[in-house]
Image: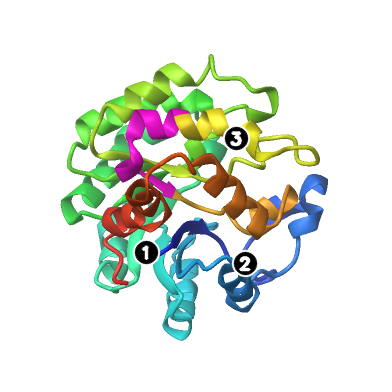
Amino acid sequence: MMRIDAHQHFWELGRFDYSWLDADALAAIRRNFLPQDLKPLIEQVQIDRTVFVQTQHNVEENRWVLDLATEHDFLCGVVGWVDLASDRCEEQLLEFKNHPKFVGVRHVTHDEPDDNFIVRDDVRRGLKVLERHQVPFDLLLYVKHLRHTVPLATEFSDLPLVIDHLAKPEIKHQRIDNWIDDFRAAAKFPNVYCKLSGMITEANWTNWNAEDLRRYVETAIDCFGPKRCMFGSDWPVCELAGSYRQVYEALTQCINSLSETEQAQVMGQTAISFYGLEV
């Protein structure tokens, strides 16, 4: 079984604008996190490959991480960024599209001041470009944005979409009432997938356990099925609340009732299929 971490990041302070790390609560991760830091962590838990996901609204980050990917075989995919709202969207995409490790695009949608950013006309034109070129898109949403998934999945029925971090439900408060309906509605569309990632930082950072995550994982598996769910560590953001090993072990504990074939889907095959990874 090929094990894939479908969601991790790198950053190098001073290379790009990491001002979001200036918040006091993020002091623990305000340092460099690079491939040489991740490699021993994935080896400890027998993860074979990883997918980097963007942190910058800057195509220079694409170039930087694609260079890293040529140096580190375990890095098998890069989800980068292009300016969806720009007339240069397609031009930017074409620079990267044919790189064998450029596998998708993301925008930090949940930080946009406009809650309707992702359904704006200019942004939807950019999503149409991704659909035309069959480049998957990561939806980084809060619960309040999840309602946009159905109209997007409807309009762009040939665009593979994946909801990062289950749209960040309020795990700390064990709340599902403001999340479950829109989540289930999104799952009805076969082009929408879900990352089982980013959960421990939505739980109580100092007092969480795997059982806190279980109802959310089981809901995702029930709604999307193992063939549309994939594991992601969200390293190094996860280190605010736990280690790489703790994230991995919590997820595997939550899916231990699945068959071996279903576990293999979640832990690797879904990511390979969704992103078209060459592994």
Magenta-highlighted stretch: main secondary structure?
Answer: helix
Identify the mark at residue 1; answer none if there is no mark: 1
Q: Nearer the viewer, mark 1 or mark 3?
A: 1
Choose between 9 and 200: the one closer to the eye: 200
Based on the picture, tell me whether residue 22 belongs to the magenta stretch: no
The answer to whether residue 111 is seen in the rendering is yes
| Residue type highlighted by circle 3 | Leu
Quarter of the image that includes the C terminus: bottom left
| Residue type highlighted by circle 2 | Trp
- Residue hosting label 2: 11
- Label 1: few (<14), some or many (≥20) within 10 Å? few
Q: Which residues are magenta?
A: 219-230
Is 52 rendered above or below residue 22? below
Residue 160: image location, x then y, percent? 26, 45
- The figure's colour scheme reads rainbow
Q: CA distance from mark 2 to mark 3?
A: 27 Å
